[in-house]
Image: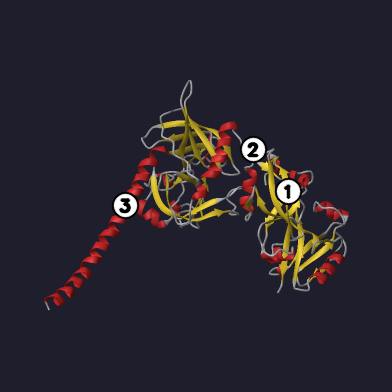
Amino acid sequence: MKINRIVPLLVLLLCIVSPAYAQDGGIENLRETGKAFASVARTVSPSVVFIQVEGKASGSAVTEFPSPFGDTSPFNDDLFKRFFGDRFPGIPHSPRPEMPRGERRTISQGSGFVFATKDGLLSDQSYILTNNHVVEDADKIRVKLQDGREFDAKIEGRDPQSDVAVLVINTGGLPALSLGDSSKLEVGEWVVAIGNPFGLSHTLTVGVVSAKGRTSLGINDYEDFIQTDAAINPGNSGGPLVNLDGEVVGINTAIFSRSGGYMGVGFAIPINLAKAIANQLMDGGEVTRGYLGIVIQALTPELAESFGLDQNVGILIAQVSEDSPAAQAGLRQGDVIVAYQGKPVTDVGRFRNQVSLTSPGSREQLTIVRNGKRRGITVTIGTLAKDKLIAEGPAQSADELGLNVQTLTPQLADQFGAKAGEGVVVTEVRPGSIAAMAGIKPGAVIMQVEHKPVKSAAEFKHAVENGSSDKRVLLLIRRGDMQQYVVLNWQ
């Protein structure tokens, strides 16, 4: 009987004690996480620098702090002014009196970090990674370390296309941060951003990797962004994004914001891309990029079906430049690239990055699909030149598509940079139509319908009527010097 009474008491006691133990364990886990962040701060902060840039301004001479994140200043927010007034660190103060036109200056700010050092005969040097947009208009650059020391810096090299810049200061003994491998980052992994938002030196914020491989954002010419929810604000630009080992995995660059401040979506340049650019800048002061000479576009399911492909894997070649490396290798318009250097190709932006970082003169293997069959092509990578950085007659109406076209006469061909008899020019696009929703605009030249050239407005109308039995039509259009396939679907 005594045993029967003891067992329920033990069970009741365990039920009472177990939550307490669980709560203590949870708190201990949080303490350990906090210690990890504190360790990162101690390791990384001495290598992070505050960058102040002085440059020439146009218009009236007002000292200002421009933001790379938009024109809306968070300092103008009424709630912000109510709490902080005009005394908040880094806030732009009242405009100074206008100076003579030749003396107008602006002051801007950002962040950076020491990533390499070099011993010299006359002086030691330390190299700092930051964003190009932080320093591109600089006449004078001043950097400040966590310990309060300040140094004049000069630009070793900068690359506007990737938004990466390297600065150098004449001092040694600074700790250089370890550069990690951004390709090994996983979505959900903890990351830490350190920088100088609003002039608040060495501010640490914490978040996770929200996504990888963000392209086509319109921020840089070459994009492969890490997306994070670690708070990034004006002044964070150029600062490091690090993992829990204190290794740099990205350079904080931009945010998506409607207010000019943090909204939970920030972007960082992956350190693997930044490192490749920085190495070239340190070697020669500029970046040499690989070049194929093709215009590419995403392979949508509609395009894949139009080209007789089972699945939309790869990217589509919309145009091949004459005498380009691609043309010399035998690549053709309409080929689908499915692999480069033995690795699958799935994204237009990432493929552009891969080619641009390939050394000119190297021979690389492409796998393409042409007429439904796979084949390998070897191409010799060229050098991207700096200047390549990235019809009259009765109008015919295609009512289903919502556009009007005219035959390209010699006069119209000259006007639109085309050749007479090679396509038709779009003269009108009705708002809300299928053509409008596909992005076709007046002035575009339609060169092919269902892979067949059209030479007149009448041919175009006939081709659309005959080729659209399934209420879908494939067009090859030209805008300026660029050609692109478009599928119009009115099912």
- Label 3: how many Cα within 10 Å (few below 14, some 14–19, many 20+): few
Instruction: Please tell me which residue lies in front, 316 or 84.
Output: 316
Residue 449 figure quarter: bottom right
User: Mark 1 = which residue?
Assistant: 377
Instruction: Please tell me which residue lies in front, 134 or 385.
Output: 385
Q: Residue 378 placed where, x, y %?
A: 72, 45
The chosen color scheme is secondary structure
Q: Quadrant of the N terminus?
A: bottom left
| Mark 3 / mark 2, whichever is N-terminal | 3
Closer to viewer: mark 1 or mark 3: 1
Secondary structure at numbered mark 1: strand
Residue 424 figure quarter: bottom right
Instruction: Please tell me which residue lies in front, 328 or 218.
Output: 328
Q: Amino acid at mark 1?
A: Ile
- Label 2: how many Cα within 10 Å (few below 14, some 14–19, many 20+): some
> Seen in the image, is 470 located left or right of residue 284?
right
Instruction: State the residue at coordinates (66%, 49%).
Output: 340
> Seen in the image, is 347 located left or right of residue 491?
left
Q: Quadrant of the C terminus?
A: bottom right
User: Mark 3 = which residue?
Assistant: 32
Tell me the CA gap for discs 3 and 2. Answer: 45 Å
Tell me the CA gap for discs 1 and 3. Answer: 53 Å
User: Mark 2 = which residue?
Assistant: 288
